[in-house]
Image: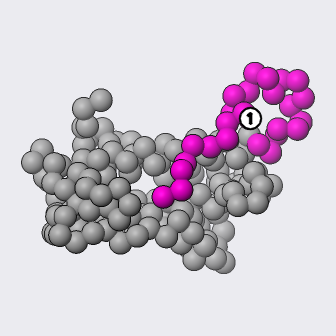
Amino acid sequence: MEPDLQHTIALLSRTPATLTVLLRDLPETLTHSNEGAGTWSAFDVVGHLIHAERTDWIPRARIILQHGESRPFDRFDREGHAREIEGKSLAQLLDEFAAVRSDNLFELRAWKLQPTDLQRRGQHPVLGGVTLSELLATWAAHDLTHLHQIARVMAHQYGETVGPFSRFLGVLKCNGHSAAA
């Protein structure tokens, strides 16, 4: 698929509302449960998305636009969400995510990026050279990955209670897809 910034922005703008509709006012047994040791709950994922909004997508895009490959991106702290969720309710996190995403998309739109801007390169600390277009596409795919993860984690809570129907429920067979960075 040829990257289309407007399509990416359209998808990114829907994630907060999607999470709100899916998660707000659900019992904590669904939103705070995970798949076992070392895994995240839906609550954790929302915190992770907030952390990424603050430290990953727009900050890295700024680095590309201001410094190109001469200044590598800061490493992303995959456990940084622990600070984001401390002492907060899921409702607070959903509201916070919606606000920070709105601010980030406002900034992204204000840049009025041209096709030549999207081909500008930055330096990822693990992957090496990446384009702004790749970074922005990854932002959208990252959202979809975590929407999938939330659905999988919540479905996991039903794993033992669906009985023989489990053979028809692919979400219960999925083991996740994210590799460590």
Q: Does the magenta stretch include residue 172?
A: yes
Q: In this view, does 112 lie to the left or right of 140?
A: left
Identify the residue shown where x is 49% and y is 70%. 77
Identify the residue shown where x is 79% and y is 23%. 167
| Residue where numbered disc 1 is placed | 172
In front of the other: 15 or 78? 78
Q: Is residue 111 left or right of residue 28?
A: left
Q: Is residue 52 left or right of residue 83?
A: left
Please rate how many residues cluster around mark 1, counting C-alpha atoms within 10 Å: few if below 14, some from 14 to 19, many from 20.
Answer: some
Residue 109: percent from left, percent from top: 22, 54
Residue 16 in sight: yes
Amino acid type at circle 1 is Leu
Majority secondary structure in the magenta region: loop
Looking at the rendered image, the quarter that the N terminus falls into is top left
- Please give the range of residues in magenta: 156-181
In front of the other: 116 or 103? 116
Q: Is residue 164 magenta?
A: yes
Identify the residue shown where x is 65% and y is 54%. 42
Residue 81: percent from left, percent from top: 56, 69
Residue 99 in sight: no
Identify the residue shown where x is 32% and y is 61%. 124
Instruction: Place residue 175 in its image quadrant.
Output: top right
Residue 72: percent from left, percent from top: 27, 69
In front of the other: 12 or 127? 127
